[in-house]
């Protein structure tokens, strides 16, 4: 496996770490293919119940490495093919029933925004900045940005990002609902560690609770656009019925009932 992305599993949590710090974790072919491989493995393993996505170096992800791509790829068709490789990894995460938390310190831009949107809960630092910036170099959004950004923050705000060279501050990203929370650190390095620590805390919270139920809740929300309103209601009904049959739910409901009786 390429060292462009690091992968480990510990007590139910898979950690995926983008590892091209000198290029701000921008995607080249090596990272793209490693991303597709690692995400597919993470979501297919029965021992993985939560996924944490983070990065080395000063930034989360600067999108695609356009300098390397322009030097090594001969045509737009090559870029399209590489984008589809990265898209496969995005689909692995978004279509799975495993919740994904991002530790997105530093800057996230371009396709990195799409990678961020493929996670379900994002933690950033107070120094973080997030934007689109595609049009600055004559390119159009890819890696799920046009597919997911408006769903996350609304069409008007999405247009503000893709039609300007604006980088949101951490406070703006939280206010807009693009990320869940921002944490502080004494300096950039300390803040990156605080972001990773908080993201791991979120993942461990899922693992300590009803991990499968969190995963199914994520699946219901993520997959809703595929269904009509009536179909979604039916899928909710089917899902809660299935969850009631699990040993975990039975044990938790029994404990809840016992605690309620004791309090009464």
Image (cartoon, grey):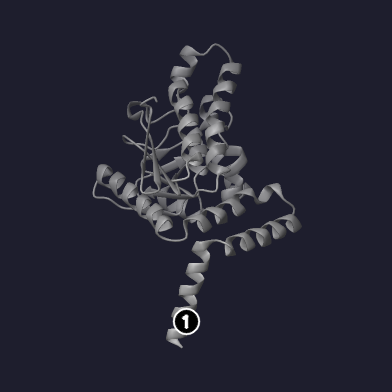
Q: Nearer the viewer, residue 253 or 75?
A: 253
Q: Residues within 10 Å of mark 1 (few under 14, many from 20)?
A: few
Q: Residue at x 33, y 30 (%)?
A: 21
Q: Nearer the viewer, residue 264 or 142?
A: 264
**What is the total number of numbered labels drawn onto the structure image?**
1
101 in relation to 141, above or below: below
Q: Quadrant of the N terminus?
A: top left
Say which residue label 1 marks: 260
Give the percent coordinates (x, y) of residue 211: 47, 56
Q: Secondary structure at mark 1?
A: helix
51 in relation to 27, above or below: below
Give the percent coordinates (x, y) of residue 245: 58, 63
21 in relation to 263, above or below: above
Give the percent coordinates (x, y) of residue 7: 38, 35
- Asked whether the viewer can see residue 187, the reply is yes
Q: Residue at x 36, y 50 (%)?
A: 200
On the image, which quarter does residue 209 sit in?
bottom left
Q: Residue at x 36, y 31 (%)?
A: 19
Q: Residue at x 54, y 11 (%)?
A: 74
Give the percent coordinates (x, y) of residue 231: 74, 55
- Asked whether the viewer can see residue 110, the reply is no
């Amino acid at each position: 496996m390429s060292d462009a992305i690091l992968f480990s599993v510990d007590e139910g949590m898979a950690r995926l770490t983008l590892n091209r710090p000198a290029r701000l974790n921008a995607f080249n072919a090596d990272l793209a293919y490693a991303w597709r491989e690692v995400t597919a493995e993470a979501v297919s393993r029965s021992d993985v119940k939560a996924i944490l996505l983070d990065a080395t170096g000063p930034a989360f992800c600067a999108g695609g490495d356009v300098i390397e791509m322009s030097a090594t790829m001969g045509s737009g068709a090559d870029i399209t093919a590489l984008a589809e490789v990265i898209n496969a990894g995005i689909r692995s995460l978004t279509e799975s029933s495993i919740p994904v938390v991002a530790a997105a310190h530093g800057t996230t831009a371009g396709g990195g925004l799409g990678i961020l949107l493929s996670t379900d809960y994002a933690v950033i630092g107070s120094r973080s900045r997030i934007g689109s910036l595609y049009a600055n170099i004559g390119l159009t959004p890819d890696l799920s940005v046009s597919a997911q950004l408006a769903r996350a923050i609304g069409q008007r705000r999405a247009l503000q990002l893709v039609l300007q060279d604006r980088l949101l501050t951490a406070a703006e990203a939280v206010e807009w609902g693009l990320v869940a929370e921002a944490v502080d650190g004494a300096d950039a390095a300390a803040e990156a560690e605080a972001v990773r620590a908080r993201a791991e805390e979120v993942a461990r919270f899922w693992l300590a609770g009803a991990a499968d139920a969190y995963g199914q809740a994520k699946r219901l929300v993520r997959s809703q656009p595929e269904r009509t309103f009536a179909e979604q209601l039916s899928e909710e009904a089917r899902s809660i019925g299935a969850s009631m049959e699990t040993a975990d739910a039975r044990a938790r409901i029994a404990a809840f009932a016992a605690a309620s009786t004791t309090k009464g």
